[in-house]
Image: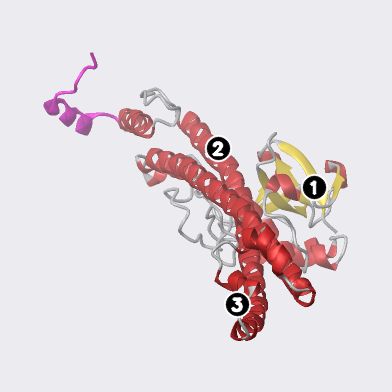
């Protein structure tokens, strides 16, 4: 049975050392966040271990973010296809109604001459397709009306095909929407775990871990002294070394977004996730890139690390879950995670997976 702390013993915290307070805070954070799925406290974590755990949470959240971005891209495409199919079905239905009305007018004239014309029965029928195929109709129809009826039959079948395709797209859309909800839950769970862990540390302790804020991902960092420009090449020299004007434009865009907050699923103009920043940068240069890192790596010509030029896309981790824009001198601009804004960083800070030249 789990032991319970007596309320009176909590007052001992006030007289403990800063190291003890730090350890207790970490233990509480580990218990509350349950980032390994067990909910077990780990009271002996060092600041370096905390940073490693937080970084792991952010990396796992980014993997889920890329899956979310991919699912959203597919959901949006399915929604567009569904809307197009519905519009086409509506247009064909209007055309069908006009054709049936025309047959009905002919039938009404024949009815006045005696008997109910089969075309009028078609207009009034609750099952037009079955009626068109009935022996009675085939026997009574005139040669003059045969072409018009054949056209109505073809329109009916075309509309049914469109409705079938729409049902398939609707099922696809609903599946993607369910996938989005699962990934969103994963992302928010990881980020909440990291936030809760970091919130138990003081500003000084968070600074020791290299965290600029509380991990909310909603603030905007100051551009002075926090974007990593000191000692690096200026934007002008980076764009001058780019392979062409479009790569230079993408690099310039990325420089202009330094300090923008990381928000998962965002593609700008004021917030970004990693692949969203890359997509927005090249969109500003007139180039359309896929939404996800694992698709972006195949959007151009692969280049080796030794061949890197400003504007090249650099990818990280074995699952290709992070991307940045290379700017020269071993540096990139990227959107790291919710604890840091868009910034300049060395490409050595993460496991390098490959690079692509878009243009």
Which callout, 3 or 2, points at the residue further toward the start of the chain? 2
User: Was residue 3 drawn as part of the magenta stretch in this picture?
Assistant: yes
Magenta residues span 1-17
User: Was residue 13 drawn as part of the magenta stretch in this picture?
Assistant: yes
Residue at image coords 86%, 45%:
303
Q: Nearer the viewer, mark 1 or mark 2?
A: 1
Nearer to the camera, 149 or 353: 149
- Give the CA distance from mark 1 to mark 3: 69 Å
- Give the CA distance from mark 1 to mark 2: 22 Å
Residue at image coords 76%, 51%:
313
Q: Position of residue 238 (x, y in %)?
A: 79, 61
Give SS at disc 3. Answer: loop
User: Dot 1: within a 10 Å radius of its alpha carbon, few (fewer than 14), some, or many (20 or more) residues?
Assistant: some
Residue at image coords 51%, 59%:
221
Mark yes or no: residue 133 visible.
no
Report the colour scheme: secondary structure
Q: Which residue is mark 3?
A: 115
Nearer to the camera, 217 or 150: 150
Q: Which residue is mark 1?
A: 298
Nearer to the camera, 275 or 184: 184
Which callout, 1 or 3, points at the residue further toward the start of the chain? 3
Name the residue at the top extreme: 1
When the figure is inspected, residue 145 is found, relative to residue 304, above or below; the finding is: below
- The picture quadrant where one finds residue 286 is bottom right
């Amino acid at each position: 049975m789990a032991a319970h702390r007596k309320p009176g013993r909590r007052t001992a915290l006030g007289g403990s050392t800063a190291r003890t307070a730090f350890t207790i805070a970490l233990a509480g954070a580990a218990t509350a966040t349950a980032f390994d799925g067990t909910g077990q406290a780990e009271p002996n974590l060092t600041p370096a271990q905390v940073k490693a755990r937080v970084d792991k949470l952010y990396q796992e959240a980014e993997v889920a973010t890329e899956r979310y971005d991919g699912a959203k891209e597919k959901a949006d495409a399915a929604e567009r296809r569904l809307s197009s199919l519905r519009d086409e079905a509506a247009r064909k239905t209007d055309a069908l109604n006009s054709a049936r009305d025309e047959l009905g007018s002919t039938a009404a004239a024949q009815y006045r001459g005696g008997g109910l014309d089969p075309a009028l029965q078609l207009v009034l029928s609750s099952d037009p397709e079955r009626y068109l195929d009935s022996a009675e109709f085939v026997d009574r129809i005139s040669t003059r009306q045969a072409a018009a009826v054949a056209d109505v039959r073809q329109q009916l079948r075309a509309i049914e095909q469109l409705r079938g395709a729409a049902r398939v797209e609707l099922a696809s859309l609903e599946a993607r929407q369910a996938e989005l909800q699962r990934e969103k839950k994963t992302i928010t769970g990881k980020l909440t775990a990291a936030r809760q862990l970091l919130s138990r540390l003081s500003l000084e302790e968070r600074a020791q871990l290299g965290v600029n804020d509380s991990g909310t991902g909603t603030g905007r960092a100051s551009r002075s002294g926090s974007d990593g420009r000191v000692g690096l090449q200026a934007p002008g020299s980076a764009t001058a070394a780019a392979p062409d004007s479009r790569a230079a434009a993408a690099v310039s865009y990325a420089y202009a977004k330094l300090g923008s907050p990381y928000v998962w699923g965002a593609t700008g103009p004021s917030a970004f996730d990693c692949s969203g920043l890359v997509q927005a940068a090249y969109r500003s240069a007139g180039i359309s890139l896929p939404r996800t890192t694992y698709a972006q790596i195949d959007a151009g010509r692969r280049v080796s690390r030794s061949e890197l030029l400003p504007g090249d896309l650099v990818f990280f981790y074995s699952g290709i879950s992070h991307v940045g824009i290379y700017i020269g001198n071993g540096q990139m601009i990227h959107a790291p995670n919710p604890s840091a804004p868009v910034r300049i960083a060395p490409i050595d800070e993460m496991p390098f997976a490959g690079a692509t030249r878009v243009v």
